[in-house]
Image: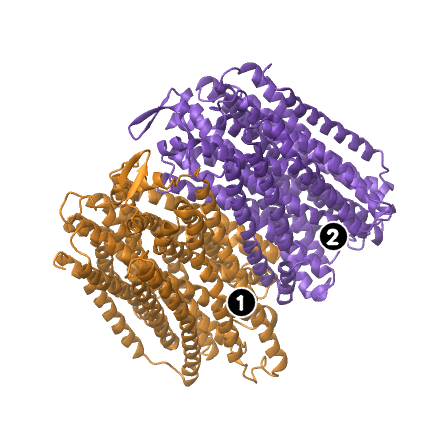
Chain colours: A purple, B orange
């Protein structure tokens, strides 16, 4: 371990700092008062429901993990087509990802009543509690991520050492813990997404449209399930999701660094390239904590002050990391530190642009969403047509931005050389990876601004159900709206980094194929009559060897299947939400019909039965789409080989990314089109246009909170599975 | 011209036979009585409206054609980066495609009243008139297609002769008339699609949902516009579309044949390979005519008899062409006639499977659509969620089928060799192309069964407006429903052949790049230090030279943009329909409000103003998306070069194909889910579920009739533009 440079220790230190600060913020939040007995009671309901669900979910997921780990163990110890560390790395990745979701949700369920209570006194009090609680989630995710990375890096360094191959083996092995994290994240997003949207859609249809009672009204039997859903979907699901994104970007870049600099003549350059992304992330943690402390408000702050304060925190952190990258890479002694720093800036800029575009297309301060509200005047059908149109058009800016970012970060890193030699390509890909790391480096604070949204939302629910009065509800609504605005930027970073990371993973796949061939004893690659040692063959060599070009029918068929996989996956999750929501509607109607006095507020609805419907649906419906995401790359690998897998991944990435942006933005725009009407436009609350936009909002729910966000994970999970299964693909070939 | 084998003359003969039969059926139809004065009057309204619109559309399109032809002329005669025949070929392709739509529509507008009149007497009388009129369209399309192909082939043969290169030049030049056809088809589909759906959506929202009057009721001011729309969108648009598909598949296969057999040792094999797809198409024409004559019914036939009779015609034609392929290719003396024949059968089988899958997912005889109806019980939001879910899931079977068909037709044609040598690849690609030709060879009859649907639909409109009574309307509804069932199969062939043709066009693009390089004086290709004569370089050589592999960032960025282009295009057309439909709704509401007595049937609505709204909207809104489809490949070519263009085409193809299936099937399923409720399920007409499913049907209208079908053309047009602009791409590189 002597070869590890001193500066590496910043990584575990940053991790411990992040976890320590998370603990401190958690304790701080717990010291706040929870409010009236009614508020405590509601919070207890939601907390218990959420925890019960999470336990149920983990119970199902654990079987999947045991089964997959057993398969990996069989492949590693019996078939010898797999690295022996994989089963363990896979399990820890899944465990830590789940833990991140669990801690985040625990905090959120304790924070909601406390936020509502603080909001009884002042707006800025509410913000402080909610945002600090969100920070617990943000810091837990980055802290656990870096901890897992640091520990595995140190452990594997004990076993593999010395030659240039060692670092390649270490980093590609570590990628498999990314697969564990992705698998956990997919289950969390899909399960949580189905849970929350079944409840939300069901509650809205009967409550808002049919019975004409407000959101979160305690008379609605589905309201507790809806609030539980916000926690299990938007908090626990998002935590697991971003844990996966964060680790995935760091690990894939480290793996690319190990390959790109494997033949570097400069002593230690390879190791530095592996550590660089971890260091940027570590420094990002400190800057995030700094940014969190910048978010302070004075007593009696206005909405504008609050927004300014939140933006200040995230923007300063992002700016500082952009500046800090230069000295980090320079002091580390990276060869091309200047170019790489510009790659990082490209990534950050792309994230900001995508965030701005998201805001433009989904906020009702702008025309596209206002036009959707206007379409409400002619009924729900035109709202839906308009929303789908807007969502589809909104894919243009993000895709073009990512395209430019790919080219720029690639060219910055390799000194603006377009010719695809082995070196240019490796350095360029490393640049793409490090751009993704840059984008996510301030996750500690951006996730805090994301996670505080559902906390504010739940605080609003608590306020409504505890009947705290108009003013408190207004304050929590304002906090929620604030969260929506900052969340747009967060989404830009999440989706942009997913695309870049997935690209980096393509290269890691080739690397894993190389190792698998070595393991299978295929040491020579034949290229145009020339025999090259497989371990020395470059990525372009492998492209030629496996004929991964666009006229190879295997590649083309793979691309078709990849595009279809994204649609199929979305279709399955949409249907799942639809089915569960129908059951929810029937149950709520039944209660309204059979339990006398609910609507007059004289009888208590049976909240438990609605919680039960959401739980069962989520449990049952999450399994098939998730397993499909794992099965497709395995089957394609066995039938179509390496060329087919790469086609699959590229088809899935290009189609899935666009589909994800479409679904997220259409959903967001419908949501805000409804809010726009509720603010008094086109007839206001209760008008014809309002009913029409509620239909849009309801359709948008699974778009933006179930299918859309799951696609990010799907894209990366398919890559991860391909990487882990490369041994099998080669053995079958 | 002496080198042209005698058997080639079958192609012009088939063309003339087709056109002659079309003329004969047209005359036969015109001899039928048009019915009561009221019927004649309504038919006259619709005919005039449709013709007026078509003239308007052609007036706009002609400017686009002149501009594009001028650009091509400049490229050819001034810059010398373009074949000198291109401007002319482009113009004739556009002209013939427009002509096919025009003739089809003329026939349809004369046939609708006559069909209604025949249906007054009997169901089978109605079928006979409608189907024979549909046959006019089918035979006109294939007749004009083969005529254009035959003439150009003969003309170009006069100018280029002798060496192996001549046929490559001839066939790639002919492809550019495909671009003219695609451009015309896109305008026709988009313009017609916007026209018809603006009217349809507007008429449905106010008429069916708000005023509770039946479809095609003369009190609805938008009803004439709706009926005109069926003609300009479903008939003229479809005619231009399928003309493009038909010619595109034959021309791209001929071009592949010229390349694949360019180095064949056997005398004349290259020419035979060029002629083979034309011959299969020619024989298909005769078999289609035979099939059309099989569609006969006895007096007093039941629905089941009619369906059987229609299926008999199409199935026998398909079966006969499958059998006939063997002797055609054997007698022609094709080297690998047996394998190629199996490629054709693979294509035919894929078309049938996709058709069956389409029927399963969109017919209310099956569960998926029934479930959408059931979702109507919980409101329109769940209908939309369910429909989108079903549509997305329905992409699975078609994509997998096309994947298998690609691999099988490729392998059958090259003797089951997977290794990607130059020869294996060329023969394999030729196999993919000829599978598409096989699929479309019986277009004469399949298009007849497609085109007769809108005729029956319009006949129903005429019957309703002329107040012919329940029974006649029932008969025309039955004919319409029958058309929906057979159209599912037709759709399978259209969409499947589009995917296969687009693949074949990829190879043609490489060929055009080769010619462009030759023209630009770049005669040597450097490959790993070795210099190869560009004209002798194979497709795999070009893949290496331009580095068209999946790790090239240009390819990846191209793929992203391709996927996005499909979404953007759909979004723009959806928005266009939404905007126009809103205007239509407002106009209809205005008339109901301001013109007293409309709803009581005492005053005549102002049909003209609604026709005007649709016309203006279509004119105005079709331009931007269509020009975008032309601009994107040009810009990508200039910025990202050959590798980027191929990435774009593959990304657009994989994503666009899946998106097209999703949109078509979701739309179809919503339509039939509504019909299912109207047949008495889940509450029947006028129930809560009925209103909910009408919303689904309305949303589905632009899905299935505007955006979805336009995507087929978009995919091919982007390829065609790339091919025609290859000279510019190379000159810029």
Label 1 Cα crowd, 10 Å radius (few <14 / some 14-19 / many 20+): many
Q: Which residue is mark 1?
A: B201
Q: Chain of mark 2?
A: A
Nearer-the-camera pick, B290 or B667: B667
Residue B144 appears at what percent x and percent y? 28, 66
Give the side of residue A569 with respect to residue A57, left or right: left
Q: Which residue is mark 2?
A: A215
How many numbered marks does the figure carry? 2
Q: Chain of mark 1?
A: B
Residue B613 is marked as none
Q: Quadrant of the N terminus of chain A?
A: top right
Residue A486 appears at what percent x and percent y? 70, 46
Nearer-the-camera pick, B211 or B530: B530
Assign a secondary structure to mark 2: loop
Residue A345 visible within the image: yes
Q: Is residue B731 above or below residue B48?
A: above
Q: Is residue B462 above or below residue A343?
A: below
Q: Residue at x 58, y 81 (%)?
A: B598
Quadrant housing residue B294: bottom left
């Amino acid at each position: 371990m002597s070869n590890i440079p001193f500066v590496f220790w910043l990584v575990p230190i940053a991790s411990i700092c992040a976890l320590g600060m998370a603990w401190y913020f958690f304790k701080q939040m717990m010291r706040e008062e929870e409010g009236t007995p009614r508020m405590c009671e509601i919070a207890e309901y939601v907390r218990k429901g959420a925890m019960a669900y999470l336990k149920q979910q983990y119970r199902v997921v654990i079987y999947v993990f045991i089964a997959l780990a057993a398969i990996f163990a069989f492949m590693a110890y019996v078939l010898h087509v797999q690295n022996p560390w994989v089963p363990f790395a896979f399990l820890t990745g899944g465990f830590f990802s789940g833990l991140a979701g669990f801690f985040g949700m625990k905090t959120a369920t304790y924070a909601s009543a406390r936020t509502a209570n603080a909001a009884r006194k002042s707006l800025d009090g509410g913000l402080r509690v909610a945002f600090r609680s969100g920070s617990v989630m943000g810091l837990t995710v980055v802290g656990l991520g870096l901890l897992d990375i640091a520990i595995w890096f140190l452990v594997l360094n004990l076993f593999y050492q010395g030659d240039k191959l060692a670092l390649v083996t270490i980093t590609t092995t570590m990628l498999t813990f990314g697969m564990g994290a992705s698998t956990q994240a997919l289950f969390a997003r899909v399960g949580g997404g189905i849970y929350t949207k079944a409840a939300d859609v069901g509650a809205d249809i009967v409550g808002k449209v049919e019975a004409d009672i407000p959101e979160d009204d305690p008379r609605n039997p589905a309201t507790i399930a809806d609030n539980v859903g916000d926690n299990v979907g938007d908090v626990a699901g998002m935590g697991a999701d971003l844990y996966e994104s964060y680790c995935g970007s760091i690990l894939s870049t480290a793996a690319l660094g190990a390959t790109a600099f494997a033949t570097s003549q400069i002593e230690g350059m390879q190791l530095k390239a592996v550590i660089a992304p971890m260091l940027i992330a570590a420094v990002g943690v400190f800057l995030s904590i700094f940014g969190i402390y910048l978010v302070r408000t004075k007593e009696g702050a206005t909405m504008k002050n609050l927004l300014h304060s939140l933006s200040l925190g995230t923007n300063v952190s992002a700016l500082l990391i952009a500046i800090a990258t230069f000295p980090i890479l320079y002091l580390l002694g990276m060869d091309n530190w200047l170019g790489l720093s510009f790659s990082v800036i490209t990534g950050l800029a792309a994230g900001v642009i995508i965030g701005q575009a998201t805001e433009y297309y989904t906020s009702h301060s702008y025309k596209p969403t206002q036009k959707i509200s206007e379409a409400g005047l002619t009924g729900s059908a035109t709202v839906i047509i308009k929303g789908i149109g807007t969502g589809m058009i909104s894919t243009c800016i993000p895709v073009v931005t990512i395209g430019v970012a790919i080219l720029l970060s690639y060219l910055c890193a390799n000194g603006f050389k377009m010719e695809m030699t082995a070196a240019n390509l490796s350095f360029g890909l490393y640049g793409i990876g490090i751009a993704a790391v840059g984008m996510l480096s301030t996750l500690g604070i951006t996730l805090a601004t994301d996670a505080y949204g559902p906390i504010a939302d739940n605080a609003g629910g608590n306020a409504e159900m505890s009947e705290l009065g108009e003013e408190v509800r207004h304050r929590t609504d304002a906090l929620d709206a604030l969260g929506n605005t900052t969340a747009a930027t967060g989404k830009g970073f999440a989706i942009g980094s997913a695309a870049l990371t997935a690209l980096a993973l393509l290269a890691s796949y080739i690397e894993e194929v190389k190792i698998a061939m070595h393991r299978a004893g295929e040491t020579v690659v034949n290229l145009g009559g020339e025999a090259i040692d497989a371990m020395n063959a470059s990525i372009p060599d492998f492209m030629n060897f496996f004929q991964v070009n666009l006229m190879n029918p295997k590649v083309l068929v793979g691309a078709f299947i990849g595009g279809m996989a994204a649609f199929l996956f979305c279709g399955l999750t949409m249907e799942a939400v639809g089915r569960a929501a129908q059951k929810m509607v029937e149950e709520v109607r039944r209660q309204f019909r059979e339990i006398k006095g609910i609507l007059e507020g004289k009888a208590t609805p049976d909240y438990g039965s609605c919680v039960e419907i959401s739980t069962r649906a989520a449990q049952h419906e999450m399994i098939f789409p998730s397993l499909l995401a794992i099965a497709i790359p395995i089957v394609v690998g066995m039938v179509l080989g390496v060329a087919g897998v790469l086609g699959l991944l590229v088809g899935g990435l290009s189609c899935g990314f666009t589909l994800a942006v479409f679904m997220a933005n259409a959903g967001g725009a419908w949501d805000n089109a409804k809010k726009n009407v509720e603010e008094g436009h086109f007839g206001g609350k209760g008008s014809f246009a309002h009913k029409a936009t509620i239909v849009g909002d309801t359709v948008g729910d699974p778009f933006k909170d179930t299918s859309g966000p799951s696609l990010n994970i799907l894209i990366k999970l398919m890559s991860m599975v391909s990487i882990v299964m490369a041994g099998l693909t080669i053995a079958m070939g």
